[in-house]
Image (cartoon, grey):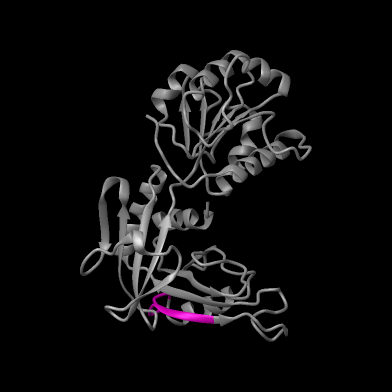
Amino acid sequence: MRTDIFEILDSLSSSPHKNVLATIVDVNGSAYRKEGAMMLFQENDTQVGLLSGGCLEVDLKARISEGNYQPHSQFVTYDLSGEDDLSWGQGTGCNGVVKVLIESLSPKLINDLVKVRDYVNDGLDVKYVRSISKAGKVLNYIFSVEKKQKFFGDWKGSIPDFDSLKEDKLVENDISESFLYFKTIRARSRIIIYGAGPDAVPLVILAKQLGYQTIVVDWRPEYCSEEYFPDADDRIIAFPQEVEKKLCLRETDSFVLMTHSYEKDKELINQLLLKQINYVGLLGSRTRAERLLTGMEIPPSFHYPIGLPIGAEGPNEIAISIIAEIISLRKVSVKAHC
């Protein structure tokens, strides 16, 4: 999951400033980031995302500032193959040629990207095609929400065949002597944490920082509150038997059981065994987990003891081990089970 895009979409949804988007559209050789990496430059000097180890961003900002944050869309090519300190590479090990598309975002495109944010937060992939002239001018664009058979954007002519395009690659369009650039903005993965204890706080903070949609669930309203979990995207009051009604579980979800209650864990496990979910993590010892799972056929998505075995101690390190395990198992397809 590329987290930069979610941070960019979140920033666009609340920013009154001029915005310029920079996208790596071609890499020849090695580079810090690959095709598809995106970065947002805002008029108030806010920058979201990263395209390199810092060597490209200064030049891009200077170009964008000169255009008063409304530059003509264009390609900018950087040769990072030099090894001396006066060259772009600065001996950092980036030895490729990187082509970056910079484009100022119109109010309509920003509104469309805010729609994209709503769709990916609801668990839907969105496909995005731009038609770009050989000089780097964005001619038109279109978004497709395949599961809803919905198209929106600013596109002239027949709708492109999305399935024929290679993702994150410039493809020549012989008909109009231009390029087509196709990208899929994947549904935002969720981490659902059942149990609003103090040990869940660092997990919520870390998950949010990494771009996951974070949901805290608990049966106690005095704990499952904004006061204790201000970083959570949602806080849901529900007993275990109510979880299925209040959450539409998706195949890419990660569900973390942190109730510290044997009976509530048992109820939740009985429900989760019937679902196809990317990850189910059980907090506690292996002995406790094996007691909870006695007599059950355990799917490979269940993990116990929770987290990668890095010798974690305390809530902060355990949160890191859990997130690391989730990252290692993440999937790209989305399927709702409600």
Task: Look at 69% across and 24% down and name the residue there.
Answer: 284
Closer to us: 58 or 331: 331
Visible residue check, residue 9: yes
Q: Residue 308 sits in which quadrant?
A: top right
x and y percent of residue 109 in the render? 32, 63
x and y percent of residue 239 in the render? 48, 18
Q: Residue 195 sits in which quadrant?
A: top right
Closer to us: 120 or 127: 127
Task: Look at 57% across and 49% down and name the residue there.
Answer: 210
Q: Is residue 19 magenta?
A: no
Q: Residue 283 sits in which quadrant?
A: top right
Q: Residue farthest to the left?
A: 157
Task: Look at 40% across and 43% down and name the residue there.
Answer: 123
x and y percent of residue 67 in the render? 43, 81
Q: Provide the residue span drawn in magenta.
A: 69-77
Q: Is residue 73 magenta?
A: yes
